[in-house]
Image (cartoon, rainbow, N blue to C red):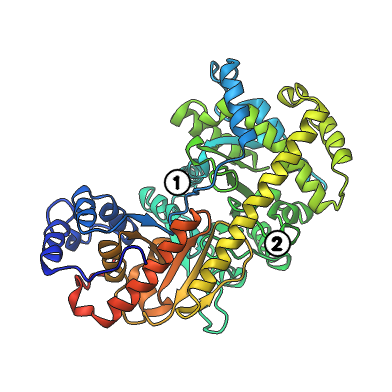
Amino acid sequence: MKNQIKIPSRMFIKKIEKIIYGKDLDIKNNKYEFNAIRRKIYCNGDILKLINKNGAVISEISSGVSDRKAYRGYIDQAAKDIKGNKYYKNYYSSAGNPEARLALSIFEGYKLNSVRYLPDDFCLTEGSTGAITMLFEYFKKYYPDREILIQSPNYYLYKFASIYYNLKLKELMPKIDNDKPSFISIDIILQNITDKTKLIIITNPANPSGEAFNREDLEKLFLIAKKRNILVMVDELFSELMFRPEKYIFSDSIASKIGAMNNLVIVKGYSKSKNLVGFRIGYLFSKNKELIESINLIAQQRSSFSVASNFTGMITLDAFIQSVRYKNIYKEDADYKLLIKKTYKDFARVPSIQEKSVNDLKLEFKKYLKYFISLMRYYSDRFDDLIKAFSGDLEFNFPKISAFNTIIKIRGINGVNSFDFMLNCFLTTGLKTEIGPCFGFDQKTWDNKLGFWLRLTFAKDKKLFNEGINKFIAFKKIYLKNPSKFLKTDLFF
């Protein structure tokens, strides 16, 4: 390996102890939860200087941020619109640019049966995080004493937001069957519903496991939600990144069939599916009129209108492309040229699409498809790399269902304080990792009940990704053989 891993000296450990127990971090204070203290340590300038001085190179294998480039056609469209003085000069309604919302309503509407989406059912947000926090703010205003159920592990923001808004969030323990554990279960959700339950949150596909809910489970969920007047929020951030997209079941296609559209709100974003983290483009949509009107008021108070409105041309172009892709996959129509002509007619009221010719859109779609196929192949290859590299250290892995992230159970770390392991891995190798307690529950629950799970992000640079995996495996061997030579806090967060 290029950088040989060395056990840190006692002098190095003493310097680190002075920082982490000092007044700036003060990790013994227990005012932090696991993810918060992890971030503070990873970003501490003094610690970073010591690690670099010790010869380690800072790297990441878990961060959930892509090293892959966005589709060039989207960047070109955004640049063209800025140069042409479009969109950015105007204020829009709090829900966002009406043209963007119209295009999204057309695209998302293909899934529905007896109902249809309208532009007023949509609100552009500051990424999916903006949508999530606005929904929690809505919940705080109207249902402050009701309970939220969430299938954990999950995106850390849900827990942060519930603490910030002082809401009752109940994290549901996943199945921990040693032969075939699962981090998603509709049955567990249904078993925990009480008269206090007003909101249920699921991520589909799930983060960090990559699992996807099946049709039967979604039907059970929406039947109960309709019967008991419960709102279901579905986070679909990764829904376009299925390795077998024809297997994916859309929640609104199920809700529309059983008349539960008023019980559903969907959140999406462009950070993962489009690799456009910094553009902060997200949206939520629902047929629940009261909810959408309240979300629009919250959006007005927060930021007047979403910055995503400035990228309306790109949003409409993507909505068109995804519409054609959806029809191709789910309507089983392989004739791209005919699909594009039909979709072009559906987008007749979207000016930024009508400015383009059908031939231009055919070329754009072909280029996007080439990009997307290459992207998914890259993700697939990284998944294969990690399974191969961890073969001797792997206790369990989820199947290759959806792209971007997965989480694996590491063999041989039972009984080890996971905070100390993660901390020493970073101090020794410079490797930043995200492990179980980053995604819900406290550290004791993970250490004592769930074990040591490591999230890995397929979207990282191939060379750095594979080097990072090798660092982790090498560190594990050294750490378990020489525990007394590493920093020991024995803290639980």
User: Can you tell which quarter of the image residue 54 is in?
Assistant: bottom left
Q: Is residue 285 above or below residue 416?
A: above
SS for callout 2: helix
Q: Is residue 434 above or below residue 72?
A: below
289 with respect to 361 (left or right):
left
* Residue at 81% in and 47% down: 327
In the rendered structure, find residue 360 and report the number of the disc placed on it.
none
Q: The residue under label 1 is which amino acid type?
A: Lys
- To which residue does mark 1 refer? 140
* Residue at 51% in and 35% down: 279
174 with respect to 444 (left or right):
right
Give residue 44's position: percent from left, percent from top.
Answer: 23, 50
SS for callout 1: helix
* Residue at 48% in and 53% down: 461
Q: Is residue 198 above or below residue 178?
A: above
- To which residue does mark 2 refer? 223
In three-dimensional space, the C-alpha distance between marks 2 and 1, rounded to whole angstroms, equals: 25 Å
Q: The residue under label 2 is which amino acid type?
A: Leu
